[in-house]
Image (cartoon, rainbow, N blue to C red):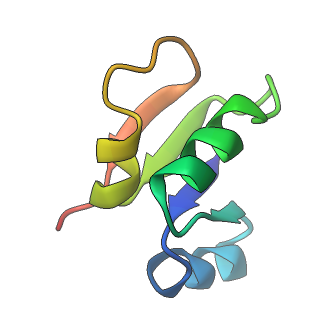
Amino acid sequence: MAIIGEAVRVTGYGLAGALVLPAEDPGEVRAVWRDLDPDVAVAILTPRAAAALAGADGGPLRVVMPG
């Protein structure tokens, strides 16, 4: 499981053992998404990260955090 989005919203998930991938702007989000390990089955995204990936194909199952 990977958590992608603004550092202030995702950092705490590392305490639960999740792979935390902070990304502050759309370009960083797309770069992190492109470089995800193929073994990642689920990606939890902040709403801003999800918006940055709108229209992107492929990758793991996406779950969007509440706003």
- Residue at the extreme front: 27
**Rendered position, 29 above or below 13:** above
Which residue lies at the image location 54% right of the left edge and 12% below the top edge?
58
For image coordinates 46% across by 50% down, the residue present is 44
Q: Quadrant of the C terminus?
A: bottom left
Residue placed farthest to the top in the image? 58
Residue 18 point in image, percent of width and height: 69, 62
Q: Is residue 57 above or below residue 21?
A: above
Residue 28 location, quadrant:
bottom right
Left or right: residue 8 versus residue 65 is: right
Residue 38's place in the image compared with 35, above or below, is above
Q: Please identify the quarter of the rendering in which residue 17 is found.
A: bottom right
Total marks shown come to: 0
Q: Nearer the viewer, residue 59 or 49?
A: 49
x, y (%) of residue 2?
64, 50
x then y, percent, for residue 1 = 64, 46
* Residue at image coords 69%, 82%: 15
Residue at image position (57%, 40%) is 30
